[in-house]
Amino acid sequence: MKSRLPRPVTPSIVALILIGWIIVAIKLDQSIFAPHKSLLLPQFGAATGDVLVTHEWWRLLVSQFLHVHFLHMLFNAACIGVTGNAIEKAYGWRVLIAVYLIGGLTGQIASVWHYPHLVTDGASQALMALCGASLVLRLNTRLKLFAGVIIVIQAALDLHAASTIKAGHGYGFAAGLLIGLGVIMATRKRADSFRIEQTR
């Protein structure tokens, strides 16, 4: 049975991404459309390899709501809005939160581990997790195609910028895929148990 909060969670996640952008822009005293310097984002909660030493694990969460480029932020927010809303409607807020947080945190950890000298920020890792889950969950074909397009775009951007798939995106996607498969297995198990009970 799906469990829900009084209000949908997806809009709140999108709002946090937008609010994070606005707060940083105000604090840096710059235009809302101007890019944020990556090296300045740790003061707002972005993560680096130092998190593995300082154990400021909260940065792995907060960093998901910080971005460098305005269009990248809007792209992530919009795509999370579509994929997150579909998952939440079909499976409830708990599954959405599990995919978003576990996938996002997995991606952030992979990023700081593989690129300790770089600043880790952005919701792309969580978005890749949502896309991974979308491919295996029982969702409509258009949503699956939408998720596939996002994955292709992200992979193309990674290959163009780094000549490889970035660790955070790859691990985030894998985490979402595994969580989605776990949800499908759990759903089937409950359905089988229900059928057995009905035949008794």
Image (cartoon, rainbow, N blue to C red):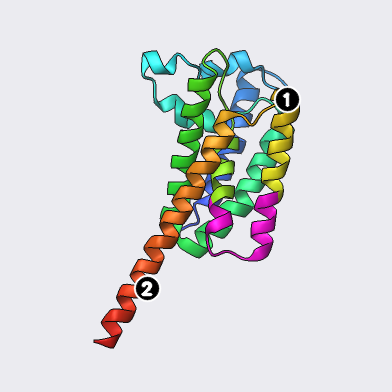
Task: Say whether disc 1 or disc 2 marks the residue closer to the N-terminus.
Answer: 1
Which of these two is toward me, 119 or 3?
A: 119
Q: Quadrant of residue 20?
A: top right
Give the CA distance from mark 1 to mark 2: 45 Å
The spot of residue 140 in percent (x, y) is: 62, 66
User: Where does label 1 land, which residue?
Assistant: 161
Residue in the image at 55% along x and 42% along y: 173
The spot of residue 71 in percent (x, y) is: 74, 34
Residue in the image at 48% along x and 41% along y: 103
Residue 138 lies in magenta, yes or no?
yes
Residue at the far front in the pictured view: 164
Residue 165 lies in magenta, yes or no?
no
The spot of residue 79 in percent (x, y) is: 65, 47
Dominant secondary structure of the residues highlighted in magenta in the image: helix
Q: Going by the image, does 10 lie left or right of 67? A: left
Residue in the image at 58% along x and 64% along y: 139
Q: Is residue 133 above or below residue 66?
A: below
What's drawn in magenta, residue-wise? 133-148
Q: Quadrant of residue 101?
A: top left
Which of these two is toward me, 105 or 59?
A: 105
Which of these two is toward me, 20 or 53?
A: 53
Q: Which mark is residue 14?
A: none
Image quadrant where one finds the C terminus:
bottom left
Q: Which mark is residue 191?
A: 2
Name the kind of residue labelled 1 in the image.
Ala
Q: Is residue 107 above or below residue 132?
A: above
The spot of residue 80 in percent (x, y) is: 60, 47
